[in-house]
Image: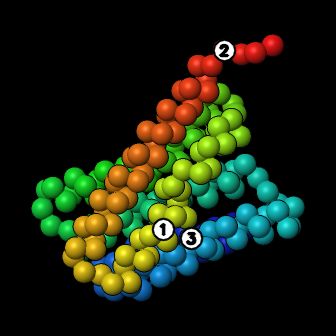
Amino acid sequence: PNEMTAFTFALGIFSALLTLVNLPLAGILYQFSSILDGVDGEIARASLRTSRLGGYIDSILDRYVDGSFLALLAYSTLRGPFWYLIALLALLGSVMVSYSTERFKGAFCRDAYLEVPALRKLPGKRDERVFLTMLFLLYPVSAFMKALFVLLAVLTNLRVALTLYFISRKVSQPKTI
């Protein structure tokens, strides 16, 4: 499983670097690395080698791949302070989607998705973001790149706001006996 984690991380970083050269290929490889990202966990379960450390490292490396991909995509396709701000919001929102649920686990020692099942239905999870990114990169015109960053900025930050709303409602509810 560790070798697969390293391979998908390297493939994800390579796809990010490809944004400087070939956007459609970069998008396809980014999607492929996202699909393969689940394989390490399957290998670990099948070989009875799961570990909290492995899951932790995989999650951290996913953030590096996503951050690198969005940063290099913004660098290669956007111009001007306004668009850099939008890209920053997309990047921060992408990181905060996972952080908002993981931080809940750290604070309350419970799984946010088990506590608030509605979170599973909110759009904007990593697989969805990567797939959207790939679709937009298949026909890489400037207007599509701007639309992608606006969509990611709105989608991710709205998801984080809704996660905070649902979790705060759940946590503040009085306990029934």
Q: What whole-number distance in Å separates the C-alpha atoms at marks 1 and 3?
A: 7 Å
Q: Nearer the viewer, mark 2 or mark 1?
A: 2
Q: Nearer the viewer, mark 1 or mark 3?
A: 1
Amino acid on which disc 1 is placed: Val
Q: Which residue is mark 1?
A: 130
Amino acid on which disc 2 is placed: Pro
Q: Can you say whether 161 is above or below 133 in the image?
A: above
Of labels 2 and 1, earlier in sequence is: 1
Q: Quadrant of residue 175?
A: top right
Q: Quadrant of residue 134?
A: bottom left
Q: Which residue is mark 3?
A: 34
Q: Residue at x 13, y 56 (%)?
A: 81
Provide the secondary structure element on which disc 2 rests.
Answer: loop
Q: What whole-number distance in Å separates the C-alpha atoms at marks 2 and 1?
A: 38 Å
Decide: few, some or many residues near mark 3? Use Cα within 10 Å; few <14, some 14-19, many ≥20. Answer: many
Amino acid on which disc 3 is placed: Ser
Q: Which residue is mark 2?
A: 174
Q: Can you say whether 155 is above or below 75 in the image?
A: above
Provide the secondary structure element on which disc 3 rests.
Answer: helix
Q: Nearer the viewer, mark 2 or mark 3?
A: 2
Q: What whole-number distance in Å separates the C-alpha atoms at marks 2 and 3?
A: 40 Å
